[in-house]
Amino acid sequence: MSITETSPAPVGHNRQGQPEITFHDFLKTGPDTIGGKYLRSFWQPVCRGVDVPKGKAKPLKIMSEDFAIYRGENGKATMVEARCAHRGAKLSVGWVDGNNIKCAYHAWSYDQTGQCVKQPAEPRPFCDKVKIRVYPTQEYLGLVFAYLGDGEPPEFPRSPEFESDKYFTLVTTDIWPANYWTQLENAVDYAHTEFLHWHFHFKTPERIEVNERPYGVKVVVPGLSDTAIHYDTMYFVMPNTHEWAGPPGKDPSMGNFARSWRIPYDDESHIRFDYRVFPFGDKDDAAFTEKVLKQNPPRVIGKTGEASQKIIAGEMDFQMLKDDPSIGGASLTTIQDCTVMTSMGPMTTREHKEMLGQTDLAIAHLRRLWKIELTAFAAGKPLRDWKRPSSLWEALGPAPDA
Ligand code: FES
Ligand SMILES: [Fe+2]
């Protein structure tokens, strides 16, 4: 993978003329940024499959760029550039016509390859000269993934443990008003779990093990949960995916495993996709399903961010949420995380000078890996071929090879 010669991204250079990547380059992900081009060189989830019903076009914003997505009669989710080639009306306000998308303004229609196939008001249609961009898509684990980069997409990355239909699963999404890097760093920061999430009843960590792996970074805090080791473990899969085990609270059957993707919506907010499996109960047992759904009510997009803003403004506090831990599907845990992240301020303009400690080792490691990768990417050099093994979680399958 490399950036193409025709689309260089602005990057600073050092005295030797080498591309000089700074932390700031991680944060901005518009189409002309180096961070944005890097993230676009991987398959990324763009929405849940259930949110694209047949026959309806919808707008999407990913990494500060607008798109339209629709599902035609043949069931294929098709993601296209945002605007009609004619006069630039948004295609998401148009119509789905069979397997085509039809612009609302003058009814130009495009097929699933982006080819214009109808221009009904043109006396001499010139459809064969008109084509819009269509992005490769693939549906997996209840999510629609797209490849938004240049050239051919890379091999689609799978996580076989999560494909099993043995378990009850939940696929959720939300948008939080914080730069995606705030969340990537929070994912590897296990020193906060005992304090911010007091209801986990975790222990003060004595040591944090940070190990680089062929997929990214493994973080273990032995003894953190004082129960099973999986609740002390986190896997960060490069470049923007992580996996963790959700602690069960008082009911051991509520323990769960999550694979999650954090995608910039724009430079100051991010979209969250979580795929969670609940392996410690019988998914065909109605009582178990009811329990899971009660503890994890459907999320209303934006509610976590809303509650967090109220806490930051001093209109609410965490203690109030403790008594009523569900607000529009937002949980106490997510509101706690979202609040501290958002309270740190816009990351791209943040002036706070950090003082990292021993417990921030994993954050420092993650920054180092990204800097190495982005520097190679900017120079057009080969990148590491990060690969998640077929098995990471012992509780979900055969012995883990991590
Ligand atoms: S702007 Fe789309 S058909 Fe005219
Ligand atoms: Fe957290």
Image (cartoon, rainbow, N blue to C red):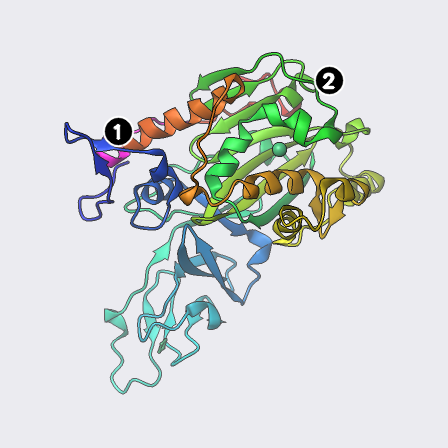
Mark 1, Cα crowd under 10 Å, few <14 / some 14-19 / many 20+, is: few
**What's the amino acid at mark 1?**
Pro
In terms of sequence position, does the residue under pointer 2 or pointer 1 come before the other? 2
Q: Do we see residue 159 in this rendering? A: no
Secondary structure type for disc 1: loop
Query: Looking at the image, do the residues carrying marks 2 and 1 touch, with CB atoms under 8 Å apart?
Result: no
**What's the amino acid at mark 2?**
Thr
Decide: is 97 above or below 42. below
> What residue is pinned by disc 2?
227
Q: Residue at x 56, y 15 (%)?
A: 208
Residue 129 sits in which quadrant?
bottom left
- Which numbered circle lies on residue 185? none
Residue 292 percent location from the top left of the image: 76, 40
The CA distance from mark 2 to mark 1 is 42 Å
Residue 25 sits in which quadrant?
top left
Quadrant where the N terminus lies? top left
Residue lying furthest right in this view? 287
Decide: is 60 above or below 155. below
Residue lying furthest left in this view? 16
Residue 316 percent location from the top left of the image: 72, 48
Decide: is 71 above or below 361. below
Q: Residue at x 43, y 50 (%)?
A: 137
Ligand 1 is located in which of the four quadrants? bottom left
Camera-side residue of 224 and 97:
224
Which contiguous range is marked in magenta? 377-386
Q: Does the magenta segment cover residue 27?
A: no
